[in-house]
Image (spheres, rainbow, N blue to C red):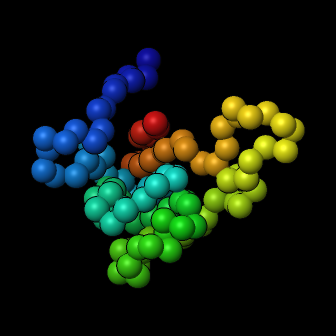
């Protein structure tokens, strides 16, 4: 059996930014919205390779020093952000899902939202 736990993120009463409970050799972050505080906080979870995928506009707004610790940085395809062409008005578009995966040994701890 694999344990599943739930973590509440973004609690305003905490002064420290949220960070993963585990550290590992590699980390993958997929997030549509990124900021300096969050990216620096989760980057500390990896002592090896760091991979970041985010929205172009948010990544462009970050300082070079913030991005310097990331080994690979990719952006979401412009096609993912476009409105659907089939006339469906209420269909979601763009990247909204968030995921963080930390590899430690033979295990991976994933946080999804």
Q: Would you say 103 lies left or right of 83 here?
A: left
Regarding residue 67, the answer to whether it shows in the image is yes
Residue 28, percent across and down? Answer: 49, 55
The answer to which quarter of the image holds residue 55 is: bottom right
Q: Nearer the viewer, residue 93 or 41?
A: 93
Residue 18 against residue 51 in the figure, above or below: above
Which residue lies at the image location 60% right of the left edge and 48% below the top edge? 95
Which residue lies at the image location 79% right of the left edge and 43% below the top edge? 84
Residue 91, percent across and down? Answer: 71, 34
Which residue lies at the image location 41% right of the left edge and 82% below the top edge? 64
Residue 84 against residue 70 in the figure, above or below: above
The answer to which quarter of the image holds residue 35 is: bottom left
Which residue lies at the image location 34% right of the left edge and 25% below the top edge? 5
> Residue at the right extreme?
86
- The mark tally for this picture is 0
Q: Nearer the viewer, residue 5 or 74?
A: 74
> Residue at the top extreme?
1
Regarding residue 43, the answer to whether it shows in the image is no
Residue 92, percent across and down? Answer: 66, 37
The answer to which quarter of the image holds residue 2 is: top left
Looking at the rendering, in which quadrant would you find the N terminus?
Answer: top left
Q: Nearer the viewer, residue 57 or 47?
A: 57
């Amino acid at each position: 059996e694999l344990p599943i736990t739930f973590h509440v993120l973004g609690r305003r009463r905490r002064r420290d930014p949220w960070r993963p409970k585990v550290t590992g050799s590699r980390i993958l972050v997929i997030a549509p919205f990124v900021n300096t505080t969050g990216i620096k906080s989760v980057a500390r979870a990896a002592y090896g390779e760091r991979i970041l995928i985010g929205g172009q506009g948010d990544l462009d707004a970050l300082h070079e020093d913030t991005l310097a610790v990331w080994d690979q940085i990719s952006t979401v395809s412009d096609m993912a952000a476009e409105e659907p062409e089939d006339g469906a008005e209420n269909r979601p578009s763009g990247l909204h899902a968030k995921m963080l995966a930390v590899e430690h040994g033979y295990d991976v701890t994933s946080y999804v939202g």
